[in-house]
Image (cartoon, grey):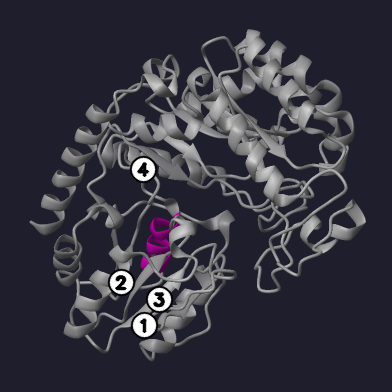
Amino acid sequence: MAHLILWNSYEFTKHSVVRPLGPHQLASWLTTQGYSVKVIDFSSLMTTSQLVNITKKYIDKDTLAIGVSNTFWDIEQSRTIEPDWVSRARGFLENLFPKLDWVLGGSRNSYLKLDLRLKWKSFAGYSEDSLLKYLDERSDKFKIRKPFDIQCNKGHYLDDNFIQPSEVLSIELSRGCQFKCRFCRFAELGKKKNTYIRDYALMKDEFMSNYERFGTTRYMMMDDTANESIEKLEALAKISSDLPFKLEWVGYIRLDLIGAKPYTADLLLEAGLRACYFGIESFHPKASQVVGKGWNGKHGKDYLLQLKDQWGDKVAFEVGLIAGLNGESEQDLHDTQRWCFDNNMHSWRWTPLSITREPEQLWKSTFDEEYEKYGYRFPNGENYKWTSDEWTSTKAVAQAHILNEERREFMHLNPWHAAFVASLGYSFDELFKKKTHELDYDTLHNQTNIFLENYIKEQLS
């Protein structure tokens, strides 16, 4: 039985295994505060009866609420209404348990204009403290508590999650970013160096606990910048060398930080890095300056090629690029595309520039707040439709789509796709050799269904 039940979902793939971290982080934290929490993973892949029957098992007189995260809802399908799998299962359960509250969390709460059939209690952004306060008030046990602190977070996955040894689990070693790229909407931007980082002993303890209980050896590091400091990398390399297994992980890495201290390329290998995402944004000298990553415009191409040779097949990486930055023309984008082709980049992805005037946006980028200063306008009054002398939001979306389609047959698996598929029992080595179109998606879909069937059976038994 549980005080709180959390439906966990990732709606963008049916041929891999994904457990978003947020609900598990909340469950671990709330459990240390005296509440019992049940996380039901893969909720969006279940039938209504399966989700309802598993949920019912954990409801009793002490159950206060059922919660859902909208972070990985399909944005185009859920801007005005919750997904069908949510509304159907909720409808059944509300008829059976009308006194339960329904809690909606996740990163999209601040700007989704949800015309919901049923009301939600909404929590936007980081919700460790606000959700704990809600539970205290709801259970009439309100007391003064210390706020959540990532530095002291023990962060263990709970025992009842039916986690398999092959899975690649998400983990959070720190929060925030020392930098403030002008397009970025993440929280805790511009933090001081070596702050909001977990105690290194607690990091090692979680790695060991997950290994001993589940056999886990592989992770997705959800830190904004995994290589944010030398101290953090040295600590992670020391932890990796002390573990009784080979630690492997994928994460977000700043290329310019490696370029400034080239020896950290080997330190990353010692720490267990197997794949990473480089947010290059632009190789164009002017556009890279506009976005706040001028080093990439001067040195990015040369250093990527150097790093590619140095790492060889030990580390795969994806290059992130933006369409729509002022100073960079359509032809410049196609020149970058050709460079990626000619130099056999493992993976790269184009994203259209996003700028919004939406007043309810929880976290705003520099472009959102000062768009006129950087040459962007909203002439039609729509909060998401911007223009500049060189671009429009519509044109940026179209160009990103064209370029992404063009590179599809040449692209290998990106770090996150590889991690999702690896959770079905594949090694990183064999996956990094494959191009995306070479995957046997029918087989992967069948393997996902088998995994899901076993998970459901375990939760119902």
Which residue is disc 4 drawn over?
13
**Mark 3 surroundings within 10 Å by alpha-carbon count, few (fewer than 14), some (14 through 19), many (20 or more):** some
Image: 157 above or below 415 = below
Q: Residue furthest bottom?
A: 140
Separation of residues labelled 2 and 3 (CA atoms): 13 Å
Upstream in sequence: badge 1 or badge 4:
4
- In the picture of the structure, the residue carrying the numbered disc 3 is 103
Element class at badge 3: strand
- Residue type at numbered disc 4: Thr
State the predominant SS element of the stretch in magenta.
Answer: helix
Q: Residues within 10 Å of mark 4 (few under 14, many from 20)?
A: few
| Label 3 with label 4: CB-CB less than 8 Å | no
Q: Residue at the location (60% across, 24% down)?
A: 268
Q: Nearer the viewer, residue 208 or 252?
A: 252
Q: Earlier in the sequence, mark 2 or mark 4?
A: 4
Q: CA distance from mark 1 to mark 2?
A: 8 Å
Q: From this viewpoint, is residue 24 visible? A: yes
Residue for badge 1: 118
Q: Earlier in the sequence, mark 3 or mark 1?
A: 3
- Identity of the residue furthest to the right in this view: 373
**Range covered by the magenta-colored residues:** 22-31
Q: Position of residue 158 (x, y in %)?
A: 31, 55
